[in-house]
Image (cartoon, rainbow, N blue to C red):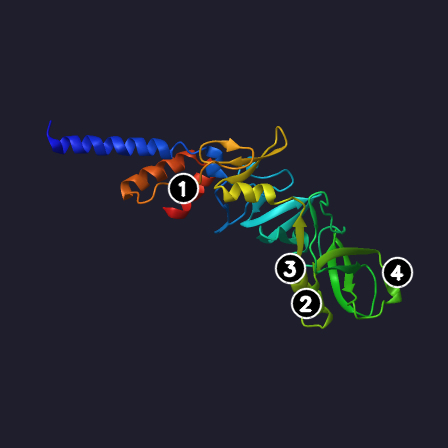
Amino acid sequence: MCPHYLSIIFFLTFIFNTQTSLCANDIRYINCSLPVYCGDQSIEINYPFWGVNRPDYCGQPGFQIECQEGVPKINMMSNTFRILHINSTTQTLKVARDDFWSTICPAYLFNTPLDFTRFNYAPGQRNLTLYYGCRGSYIVYPDCFVNDTSMDVFYAPQSAPVDPLIVRCSSSVIVPVLETAAQELDQRRNTINVTLDEGFELQWNLGSDQCNTCVNSGGFCGYNSTESLFVCFCRDQPNAIECSSSPGPPAGLSPLLRYYNLTCFLELIHPETRALYYLWHF
């Protein structure tokens, strides 16, 4: 046989074997390695959060993220919060109440419920109280429609004395805000809407040692809901603590091999993620 054909056969055999190796990546490892695609942005959201194109095994119960009208949101105690920022290093989540976004006239009046089994307030927050259906001498917003009822709204800055008429208000709502934003509001250098839209910060109540060990070994953190146990997703298979070897495709792949790797990758990943990938890149 001609040496030229022998080299072609060898090359194709090498490609097939390489593709088979690349396609051996565990599907859960691939899915949990991806960011969340929401709207026109990709958001680096890691364990314990999951949702949208990240399956539930990529995070823990109570940390599901939804994408509504291009905005990432999280539900707690039947209330919806917009996600403004996530810092995995400090384990802080910055959110704002969705019903108070760009308004102080929500459909219904209730305080801010939080899931304290999973979250606590981060340092540097303050409770802001809004008063409805009353008369006062401070910053007043007339004609606010709440549950189809027109009522005046006002709040008392922390530096101001308490108006005795507040006790005659029909309702009040407590909304957490950043202390820095509240100080700007006290000094009349910010509006109430801007203060509320800046949100507030929470810290989630999960230890990071297990996940750090997994990530440092080249894996991605996940959760076994059947056994309620942490799991480390590795290239070859899930492990309880860490991976035996670091992930990553072989260095110096030719364009043709990279194409085969991409083809395999798109076949394996979550169907919704695959559709988003095609939408973004083609």
For disc 1, the neighbor class at 10 Å (few under 14, some 14 to 19, many from 20) is few
Q: Name the residue under label 1.
A: 248
- Name the front one of labels 4 and 3: 3
Residue 179: image quadrant is bottom right
Q: Which of marks 4 and 2 is nearer the N terminus?
A: 4
Confirm whether residue 6 shows in the render: yes
Say whether residue 176 is left or right of residue 248: right
Provide the residue designation for mark 4: 167
Q: Which residue is drawn at 53% across and 40% down?
A: 214
* Mark toward the start of the polypeptide (1 vs 3): 3
Residue density around tag 4, few if under 14, some if 14–19, many if 20 or more, within 10 Å: few
Look at the image and tell me in which quarter the N terminus lies. Answer: top left
Using residue 58 as the reference point, say whether residue 280 is left or right of it. left
The amino acid at mark 1 is Gly
* Mark 3 residue type: Asp
Label located before the other in sequence (1 or 4): 4
Q: Distance between the residues labelled 1 and 4?
A: 64 Å
Residue occupying the far front of the picture:
244
Mark 1 in CB contact with mark 3 (< 8 angstroms): no
Residue 191, which numbered label?
2
Residue type, numbered disc 2: Thr
Q: Position of residue 162 (x, y in %)?
A: 85, 67
Query: Could you tell me residue 39's position as x and y percent?
Result: 50, 49
Residue where numbered disc 3 is placed: 197
**Amino acid type shown at disc 4:** Val
